[in-house]
Amino acid sequence: MILSRARLAGGAARAVLVNSGQANAATGPRGAADAESIANSAATAAGIGQNELLACSTGVIGEPLHFDAMLDALPTLVADLSSDGGDAFAQAIMTTDTVEKQATADAGGFRVGGCAKGVGMISPNLATMLAFVTTDAHVSTADLDLLTREQLGPRFEAITVDGCPSTNDTVLLFASGADQSDSVRPGTPAWEQLSSAIGEVGSSLAEQLIQDGEGATHVLVIDVVGATWEQDARAVANAVANSPLVKTAAFGEDPNPGRIVQAVGSADVTMDPSVLDVWIGDVQVVLAGTIPPEYFEGELRSQAQLAMKESEVLMTISLGSGPGSSRVLGCDLSYDYIRINGEYTT
């Protein structure tokens, strides 16, 4: 990531080399030297400038790159480059992912496609994953940066599996210009189409990441409305999505509103508890800061429990009448998450 940041600061990039298995983080000077050397060798093999090739790594933190094996593979990688290699690439970058993650969208006369990997150690800022989005539109470097920040950043910043940021978060947006049309610029209909398509691909990839969260059996959709500020809504949504109590309740399909209230209160946000409302699905389980007595009498709880059985569990939290709102996607915490991460390096 450090190498890629430095090269992007100097201009545009034409290619990216991705390895899976070793994160090449916490590897010291050797890791930096290995990344630069293998990236330079890959650029030479591909016939492009060294600063035009970026490098991304994913896998075990602290383990050095398998340098010789990567170097030996470069001629084959370059020889096998093709316009229909998306499936192979998406599969090759998987670590504990169980399925590949790809998405496409039309942007009028342009096309947008992307793939991503990541199922654990995912939490903003960004979510912990690698994501690559491409388009055949002709877009300037500055405008690509704008599209990335406006359309991809907010989507990947709104997902969490376990509340644990990692070391190698990367989102890259490439525009080949292969369409050979005029450059797409802000304020034009073409820009709006392209922007929408990039957002669509980003949303799909983000949701796929959460659906494949390590050991996940339920996706949590946390909608927070009525906050004073958007950042307050985002803080509450993240607190609920990352709460081990909420996540384990979701796994057990237990509609325990007390756990949601606890998570809301744990966020560093000023609010009036007497106006707090919470719904699970379309069942209101907190009204004006109070869990209704009828919840404990059976029927209301049964209705909420049915909502908890859905593969996608919606929790809506109203903090008042302010304009701030936010949505965060999370997942439950299962036995398999413990097993996967307990055995990660063994």
Image (cartoon, rainbow, N blue to C red):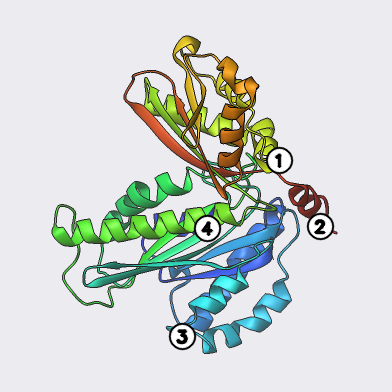
Q: Distance between the residues labelled 4 and 1?
A: 22 Å
Could you tell which of marks 2 and 4 lies nearer the N-terminus? 4
Observer-side mark, 1 or 3, equals 1
Residue 260: quadrant of the picture: top right
Q: What element carries label 3?
A: loop
Name the one closer to the observer, 116 or 311: 311
Residue hosting label 1: 252
Type of the residue with mark 3:
Ser
- Check the image and report above or below for 43 versus 235: below
Quadrant placement of the C terminus: bottom right
Q: In the image, which disc is placed on residue 208?
A: 4
Residue hosting label 2: 345
Classed neighbour count for the residue bearing mark 4: other residues with Cα under 10 Å, few (<14), some (14–19), many (≥20): many
Observer-side mark, 3 or 4, equals 4
Q: Residue at x 43, y 20 (%)?
A: 319
Name the one closer to the observer, 22 or 210: 210
- Check the image and report above or below for 311 versus 93: above
Q: Can residue 15 be seen in this view?
A: yes
Could you tell which of marks 4 and 1 lies nearer the N-terminus? 4
Residue hosting label 3: 82
Is 108 on the left-hand or right-hand side of 165?
A: left
Name the one closer to the observer, 56 or 96: 96
Q: Distance between the residues labelled 1 and 3?
A: 46 Å
